[in-house]
Amino acid sequence: MTDSTLDRPRAAKSAARRQHLLDTARNLFVERGFHQTGMAQIAAASGIAVGQIYRDFANKEAIIAAICETECAAWLDEKALSAAVAAQDRTAILEWVERIGFDEPDCEDRRLMCELLAEVGRNPAIGQMNARVDERLRTSLGAALGSLAPHASSQRRATVMDFIVTMSWGMVALRQLSPDSDHETLHTRLAALLRQEVAALEE
């Protein structure tokens, strides 16, 4: 039996411990907020010693970053977009763009996003993490819009990107702040506006 064979169960155990820690921390962040959740609370809720947590993550911000990385990758689904762009699949690209603009997260996800938004202005580490996420989002949106409207100017595409990002955050805020609003009607109208904007880019 080789050393690598012996290491596989250990690596699997380590990955399972790390995922359990991230799941626990995420639940605490949603329930209590970032400021009311420290390493001691995460350790108590997860059953993982504080010393072990610090061996896996340098600080609380590193835990937040790991959670956001996983959720950002799932949300952006960059591989699916790349495949659609490579195939020049206009329908799939438009569906991806509309999902980014209007896919409404559930209550837990919205609360976590609002926590992150609040931290961006006061925590430099979270601000830098958000900047990286925003760059990835805009890179993907740029690829999508560039494929749909290759002759549009970069300024026009940037304006449509801002429109999409604003709609995305706006729908999250509306759902959180006004849960009884007619979200479906607004969704339909904004989706129509987005399609008009994309069509105008293609002209």
Image (spheres, rainbow, N blue to C red):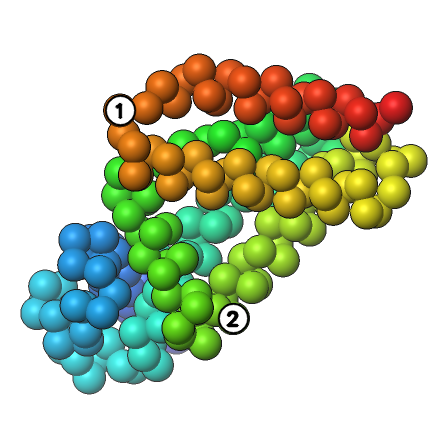
Considering only order in the chain, which callout, 2 or 1, is on the residue closer to the N terminus? 2
Kindly identify which residue carries mark 2. Answer: 128
Residue 180 - label: 1
- Residue 78: x and y in percent read 61, 44
- Report the side of 135 relative to 66 (left or right): right
What amino acid is at disc 1?
Asp
Q: Is residue 145 visible?
A: yes
Q: Which residue lies at the image location 51% right of the left edge and 16% below the top edge?
A: 188
**Is residue 150 or residue 21 the one in the foreground?**
150
Q: Secondary structure at mark 2?
A: helix
- Residue 133: x and y in percent read 54, 57
Residue 110 - label: none
* Distance in Å between CA atoms under marks 1 and 2: 34 Å
- Report the side of 73 relative to 37 (left or right): right
Q: Quadrant of the C terminus?
A: top right
- Whether 104 is drawn above or below 69: the answer is above
What amino acid is at disc 2?
Gln
Q: Is residue 13 visible?
A: no
Q: Quadrant of the N terminus?
A: bottom left
- Whether 63 is drawn above or below 186: the answer is below
Where is residue 67, by image quadrant? bottom left
Q: Which residue lies at the image location 55% right of the left edge and 42% below the top edge?
A: 166
- Report the side of 66 relative to 152 (left or right): left
**Is residue 15 or residue 53 the one in the foreground?**
53
